[in-house]
Image (tube, coloured by chain):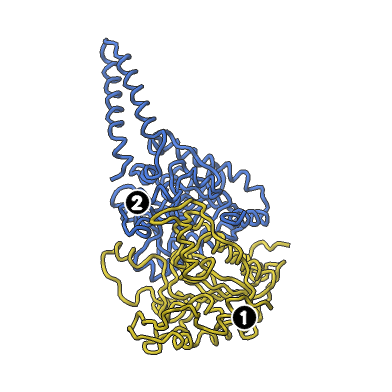
Chain colours: A blue, B yellow
Amino acid sequence: MNVIVEREKGLLELEQRIAELKAQAAQQPVDMSGVIAQLEQKYAEIQREIFGTMTPWQRVNMARHPKRPIGSEYIAALDQFDELHGDRHFRDDHAIVGGFAKLRGRRVVAIAQDKGRDTKEKVYRNFGMPSPEGYRKVNRLVRLAAHLRLPVVTFIDTSGADPGIGSEERAQGEAIAQSLYELADARTPVVATIIGEGGSGGALALALADRVLMLEHSVYSVASPEGAAAILWGDAARAEEAASRLRLTSDDLLAFGIIDEIVTEPIGGAHRDPGGTIARVLDAVVSALDVLEHVPADELLQRRYAKFRRIGAPA
Amino acid sequence: MPVPEWLRIRRSSPIAAEDAAQWTKCPKCSEMIYRPDLAANLWVCPKCNHHFRMHAFDRISLLVDSDFTEIGGDLLPGDPLGWTDKVPYPQKLERDREKSKLTEGVVCGFASIGGFPVALGVMDFNFRGGTMGTVVGERIALLFEAARERRVPVVIFTASGGARMEEGMLALMQMAKTTLAVRRFHDEGGYYVCVLTDPTTGGVSASFAFQADVIVSEARAAIGFAGRRVIEQTIRQKLPDNFQTAEFLLEKGAIDMVVERRDLKPALLRLLDYGSGAKPSANGRVASAANRSESPA
């Protein structure tokens, strides 16, 4: 059960009551503005209490919230999108959507991991867990982008790369390694945004970027809290404890220099204002591209090298 | 060329004197093996041919001509997250240092193998399961950077459980760091051979291990991305025995060759010989500049 969904239940009820009272007030001569104001104040208080400071585990749940904006919704918010399918070898991986796009009038190659919204979509998207052919599609699209000098914009939201038999048979490790290898030397600006879950190598494969943005309540982690708990204590149920130790929140990662910028979310989380949140992310991406586009390719690559070379290097 | 203390000791008496247990049981066939015999047989069970996981020092000692100049050996792990699970991370590191006599999960340096000068990196499963934290990433990156300057090929033996949990995202980012170092080395014409040994999984398989020009695997090594248990839990069924073995990967076309340990050194020498025509240049992007739409001046 998602702890955020649980916690916001009461809040949503209150919200509904306020809306009902307001509707009544509009039809009746009785002055209810006092009651309404009181409820609204209470609402704001509870909201602050729930969302003012969130634990890492609550952030994990926020990142996995069933209503959180997903990759395809960011793609849909672009001015224009022409999907390019497939890895040219095996099949089209639906966990990754990519293609030519226009972002605020600018030509880009956009690539998003998508978890799907309803059950049918989730199955179709393999719950946002890319298979090797997904990473090979990324590889191909990055090469295409560099060839046409189009910036690459990625939106990351995955619990991790697909851990199935078929994925191992088709060399998942190699596919991720090659996606990283391609991004390492792509002679075009790359801007990555963690919009939900940044699950381990399966997320990093799209995030070796010149600028890495992160939505405030997203998480980005070396392993899923459940996976880490299973490894460390042999008990996946200790996920909450693992989450508190992994330093997977946006503030932690900004402090470590692993991400470059946090894009704030409305109080209550991105799903409280999906359109506004998506627009803010796209604004941040555009601002990053504005700067990066003026950097000559050789220097861009030098900076990209130095940026990641520093992480975890001795002081 | 300087010879480190451990290499001298390894050479003069292959079995450490302090080793109380002179007999080892083969985990595969349960045969009791006299340790000096096991060492003399390249840590391969004389009865069932099981390849024991090798200590990095033993591997280097058996491989190099006489010299070995370690680089990055002075880089030691810190505790960037202030990590504790069952025990504090620094305590785990201390325990592994004692047990393995290593300072980290990889030993890197310069040596010659059969007369070929190489940059050599050997991972060791005995130190934190060969997991890649900041120091492993840093040492590997340094190795590629130094190899690029000296214009020598890189040979890496991998053995790793993946990224190191206890260093969190700083560990994961070493996949990006090592990738950048491999790419730069390779783009300037460098030649890189990777030997996968048991086990090579997770973040190491998904970064520098599978970015080599030639990928060799020791026979019967476990190689994969996701852990076996994770897959079994996901699909809720038992996996076939050969799943994620070197032979399985060879069959699927993911690696170049599978080699028995006794044949490994000769195979490596042949591979180094084939690559001796590579002309790395520290200034131009020889290898791939021709394929690019824009070649730098």
* Badge nearest the viewer, 2 or 1: 2
Tell me the kind of residue under disc 2: Ala
Identity of the residue drawn at 61% across and 68% down? B143
> Residue A233 vs residue B181: left or right?
left
- Whether residue A143 is visible here, answered yes or no, is no
Looking at the rendering, which quadrant does residue B155 occupy?
bottom right
- The residue nearer to you, when weighing B209 against A82, is B209
Under tag 2, what secondary structure?
helix
Residue A89: horizontal and vertical position, in percent? 44, 68
For this view, does A290 lie left or right of residue B41? right
Please give the chain letter of the residue carrying mark 1.
B
Residue that carries the numbered disc 1 in the rendered image: B275
Whether tag 2 and tag 1 are in contact, CB under 8 A, the answer is: no
| Amino acid tagged 1 | Gly
Q: Same chain, marks 2 and 1?
A: no
Quadrant of the rendering where the C terminus of chain B is positioned? bottom right
